[in-house]
Image (cartoon, rainbow, N blue to C red):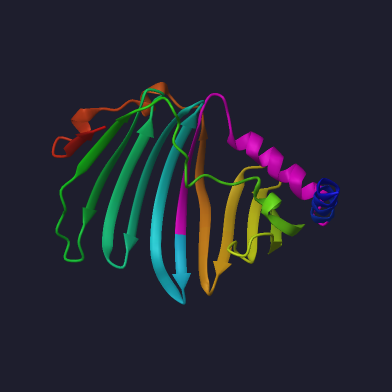
Amino acid sequence: MMAVVAMMATVIVHAQIDPKVIEVLKKSQEKMSNPHGTEIEMTVEVTLLVKLTGMKIKCAEKNNKIRMFLESKVLGQEMTVESGFDGQQEWEFMHSKDDDGKARRDTLTIKKTTQKPKNENTIDFGIYKEYKTAKMKLSGQYYEITLTNPIKKDSPGKVVMKIDKDKYYFREMKTKVKGVTMTMTLTKIKIGVSDDVFKLDLKKYPNAVIVRK
């Protein structure tokens, strides 16, 4: 009986999700995941009346390999993080400056592993599974998808995504939680990435303290 009730509840939830929304998100996921590799550049802004945080992200992925560059400025403090995974090892380089502009000691952490790390900055195309209601409309060049009524209480009450109507590339995602708005915007995409991009070159970090795990 419990299994039947759970199954019926799932059917009711997804009945409020426009099937066209799921179709567009799946097509976008396919376009953004290419076996020859995909490199994207994004900006992320967090605002509460004024901009609190600004980030620039450059991410390359190919099969099980990943390379990430992140620049951020939070309350006057600048930070640069580079990370990567080549199938045999994972690494992270961190460079930061204090409010007075004084640089902290650079660190490079290297870990032997064959398990691909989770990309926290990836675009979640399965986000519709976390909401009870999703609607879509055409707004200029983009499909505008609005998700509301989250299943979990800690999820944003509303998420708005934009997908290019012709190429199906992701363009923008905006969320708002307790007055804080986060906007993630795709600024550039490149299909086809060389394997050299994912290699760790220690010569690029001559002054870093190296920590091996």
Above or below, comparing residue 65 to residue 133 in the picture: above
Identified at 43% across, 74% down, the residue is: 50
Q: How many marks?
A: 0
Identified at 70% across, 40% down, the residue is: 26
Query: 83 left or right of 187?
Result: left
- Towards the viewer: 118 or 161: 118
Query: 116 left or right of 210?
Result: right
Magenta stretch contains residue 43? yes
Identify the magenta region: 16-44
Q: Residue furthest toward the front?
A: 1
Indicate the position of residue 138 as horizontal and vertical percent values: 75, 56
Indicate the position of residue 179 as horizontal and vertical percent values: 53, 75
Identified at 46% across, 27% down, the residue is: 193
Query: 49 left or right of 130?
Result: left
Indicate the position of residue 182 as horizontal and vertical percent values: 51, 63
Instruction: Work out whether residue 139 can be spotted.
Output: no
Instruction: Work out whether residue 126 can be spotted.
Output: yes
Above or below, comparing residue 159 to residue 28 in the picture: below
Which corner quadrant holds the C terminus? Answer: top left
Magenta stretch contains residue 84? no
Indicate the position of residue 147 as horizontal and vertical percent values: 70, 60
Query: 191 left or right of 142?
Result: left
- Towards the viewer: 77 or 113: 113
